[in-house]
Image: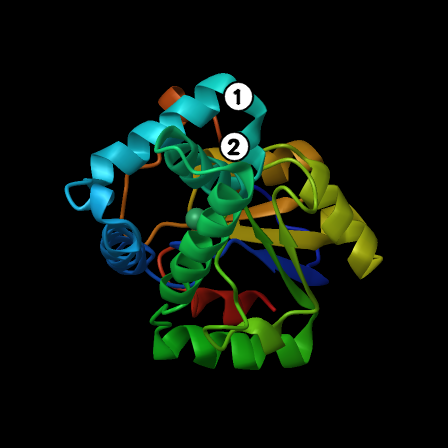
Amino acid sequence: MYFYRQLTSISAITFDLDDTLYNNKPVIDKTEQNLLSFIRYYDNRFNNLQLNDLKNYQKLIINKYPEIYHNVTQWRWLAMKTLLDHYGYNQTKSSDGANAIMNNFYYWRSQIIVPKLTHQILSILYKKIPLAVITNGNANPYACGLGNYFQFILKAGTDGRAKPYTDMFYLAAKKFNIVLDNVLHVGDNLITDIQGALYSGMQACWINTNNNLLDINKNNILPHIEITNLASLIKLI
Ligand SMILES: [Mg+2]
């Protein structure tokens, strides 16, 4: 554990989800493969569709609606609807099809393997202080057995603009009824998590499971603390 800034008292913790509480890559890879199979089966004109084609539809949407990145669910849904529109589906059928594709997406997106250590640490922490989630993604903590540790879950899109915008950090402190200074945000991303937390006035803990170099000159972002393992949090509380 490295200390870069003076910590003040910690009365609540907010967590990022993806790559903070579990490794997100395996579940995303599996979700994308299964999603592609589902779409290919949905209409035999899609038999030769590739993942890149799906990504191109997402690019099309973000170019048309740059602000849609705040809501990744809406972004994916609209990309899938646009694909079906381009293949001549009428409005009702393309909406229904996009819903079906997204239901498949959510099923696989929820098949997250949460490490035992994450459960061990959260089950100790949540008895001591209130915990919550602030995520830019669309994973469902209840579907992977994490939901009950948290007092609330804030998702970009429905609860404010995506991190590093301060919306969800402010909302979390308000919901805890705790001043921002006394909330610690834990996350893996130096921009969305650490810069976002610092801008909003929270304390920031960078979880660096891959032992990346903290290049202060390049990023100009200095967390309060850096940890490589969630277990370090136990010592702080
Ligand atoms: Mg993350």
Give the residue number, with chain letter if any, for mark 1.
66
Give me the disc on residue 158: none
Quadrant in the picture for residue 231: bottom left
Residue under the point 37% across and 21% down:
218
Q: How many marks?
A: 2
* Residue 114 location (% of width, % of height): 37, 72
Position of residue 174 in the picture relative to residue 90 (left or right): right
- In the picture, residue 85 is in which quadrant? top left
- Residue 212 visible in the snapshot: yes
The response on whether ligand 1 sits within 8 Å of label 1 is: no
- Name the residue located 61 percent from the left edge and 40 percent from the top edge: 197
**SS under mark 2:** helix
Q: Is residue 136 above or below residue 229?
A: above
Q: Work out whether residue 166 or residue 225 is closer to the camera in this orientation and state it.
A: 166
Q: Say if 8 sits above or below 117 in the image.
A: above
93 w.r.t. 148: above or below: above
The residue drawn where x is 40% and y is 23% is 60
The residue lying furthest to the top in this view is 63
Check the picture and name the quadrant holding the N terminus. Answer: bottom left
Horizontal and vertical percent position of residue 213: 29, 37
Q: Is residue 2 visible?
A: no
**Mark 2 C-beta closer than 8 Å to ligand 1:** no
Q: Are marks 1 and 2 in contact (CB under 8 Å)?
A: yes
Residue 8, how many percent across, how many down? 69, 52
Q: CA distance from mark 1 to mark 2?
A: 7 Å
Q: Is residue 132 left or right of residue 54?
A: right
Classed neighbour count for the residue bearing mark 1: other residues with Cα under 10 Å, few (<14), some (14–19), many (≥20): few
Residue 44's x, y, as percent?
22, 48
**Residue position for label 2:** 69
Q: Secondary structure at mark 1?
A: helix
